[in-house]
Amino acid sequence: MDRLTRTLFGSDFEWGVSTAAFQIEGACDADGKGESIWDAFTAKKGKVIGGHKADIACNFYYNFKEDIDLLKKLHIPNFRFSISWTRVLPDGTGKVNQEGINYYNRVIDYCLEQGIEPWLTVYHWDLPQELEQKGGWTNRQIVDWFSNYTEICARSFGDRVKHWMVMNEPSVFSGAGYFFGIHAPGRTGIKNFLPVIHHVVLSMVAGARKLREILPDANIGTTFSCSHIEPASQSKRDIAAAHRADALVNRLFIEPVLGLGYPVNEIPVLSDMQKYILPGDEENMHFDFDFIGLQNYTREIVKYSFLTPYIHARLVKAAQRKVPLTAMGWEVYPRAIYHILKKFDAYPQIKKIIITENGAAFPDDLIDGNVADVQRLDYIRENLQQILAARQEGVNVQGYFVWTLTDNFEWAEGYHPRFGLVHVDFETQQRTIKSSGYWYSDFLKG
Ligand code: GAL
């Protein structure tokens, strides 16, 4: 294979790193910020490994200049970050907290001064706790709450921010947060999950339309998590189970947004959503996004399972398959991203794909001021090779964002999984660029 160079991807290809407010900012109650569901969830016993909290996290709120300087030093031209809803609207609705707006203005302005393009995610999982008390995503009023919040973001930052993502991975925050209860707000069961799915879809579209109305020239996308899925065997039952799992993991949120409706045939329990779908909703479920953000980390192997409710399919854990693993227990399988790109490129409604997250956690060692994270470096390089292969076969993929710049708060897993190109000592907040960071920098420099 040819040496991997930036030029092979073309001059318009967007390169960056991704982050999320709750995972890096800290300053959990500074300058009028309200409580989010993740503040409330991490305060409860037994929800996060090690009882870790994100009150300080990477201290990005106070140290953002240092991290943006690192971006510049590493030749990373695009920076994806999210807005914390409760900094802007402490109660989710009502009075705007000007201090929160001022903070994001400082971050955006500093990026632009350094020649770095900001890419904003409106919602990366940190719902205002005040809204959760009113039902959160299960309450249909959230469509208005979310549009109002998006409108404030668009009017406050849209004069300088050209690239927008409405939501981050709806299937994860609704599935983990409202069905399995392993993420905030920790609710469980199909009764919560079904209305949440529909309200999330309506909100994603309402938010996107607000952005389009206020910022007609903006580049508007939204992001989806996706895993390449294969059946455990060639038996009819496993193949059908893999098909159902694929509908749940990869199709549930994107297909309605593309105008294709919910995958009810594969997941019959979705027909119980009918009671939440009101007359006129169908017109408000799709949007013509400028780009679709895909976030892929691994592949999953799926087996028929009589005992698993609703989809009769279960994952065969990577640890049981004797394959290389990341610190998250996910299989290292770079070919997955190639399959995902081919799969989503086949939807004629998708105009452009950007890989808005891809990366890996490994247990890094800081030795004599160096982190030789060869596994992460190889992971990123091999994933890029697969993206290039897809692109050379005509897939319209136009960007790649590494998850993530610095090690940070990895949700229910706490601080143990380290995903950064830059190591963080959480005691001292000292940053150390890892080998992968230097590699990405050299690659971007050409
Ligand atoms: C994504 C998520 C990120 C990050 C990453 C690594 O699902 O958007 O916030 O945590 O996974 O697990």
Image: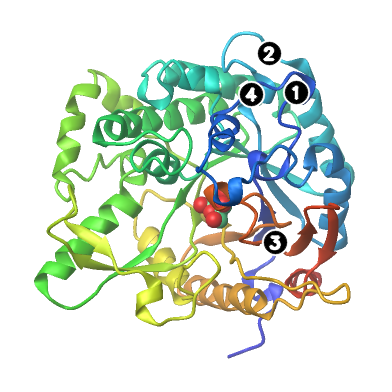
Identify the residue at image location x=81%, y=70%.
445
Secondary structure at numbered mark 1? helix
Q: What residue type is labelled 1?
A: Ile
> In this picture, is 421 found above or below 439?
above
- Label 2 or label 1, whichever comes before in sequence order: 2
- Image x and y of residue 431, in percent: 84, 59
Q: Which class describes the residues within 10 Å of circle 1: few (<14), some (14-19), or many (20+)?
A: some
Tag 3 and tag 4, C-beta contact below 8 Å: no
The type of residue carrying mark 4 is Thr
Q: Do the residues labelled 3 and 1 touch (CB within 8 Å)?
A: no
Q: Which of marks 2 and 3 is nearer the N terminus?
A: 2
For disc 3, the marked residue is 420
Which one is in front in this view, the residue at disc 4 or the one at disc 1? 4
Q: Where is residue 294 in the image (x, y as percent from the top left)?
A: 49, 55
Is residue 204 something that shows in the picture? yes
The image position of residue 434, as x and y in percent, is 78, 70
Q: Nearer the viewer, residue 236 or 151?
A: 236
Label 3, label 1: how many angstroms apart (C-alpha)? 27 Å
**Nearest to viewer (mark 3 / mark 1):** 3
Is residue 150 left or right of 240 when viewed as pictured?
right
Q: Distance between the residues labelled 2 and 3?
A: 33 Å
Q: Distance between the residues labelled 3 and 4?
A: 26 Å
Q: Which residue lies furthest to the bottom in this view?
A: 1
Secondary structure beneath label 3: loop
Which residue in the structure is indicated by mark 2?
96
Q: Nearer the viewer, residue 97 or 291?
A: 97
According to the image, label 4 marks what residue?
A: 86
Is disc 4 in contact with disc 2, using a CB cutoff of under 8 Å?
no
The numbered mark at residue 335 is none
Of the numbered discs 4 and 1, the one sitting upstream in the chain is 4
- For label 2, being within 8 Å of ligand 1 is answered no
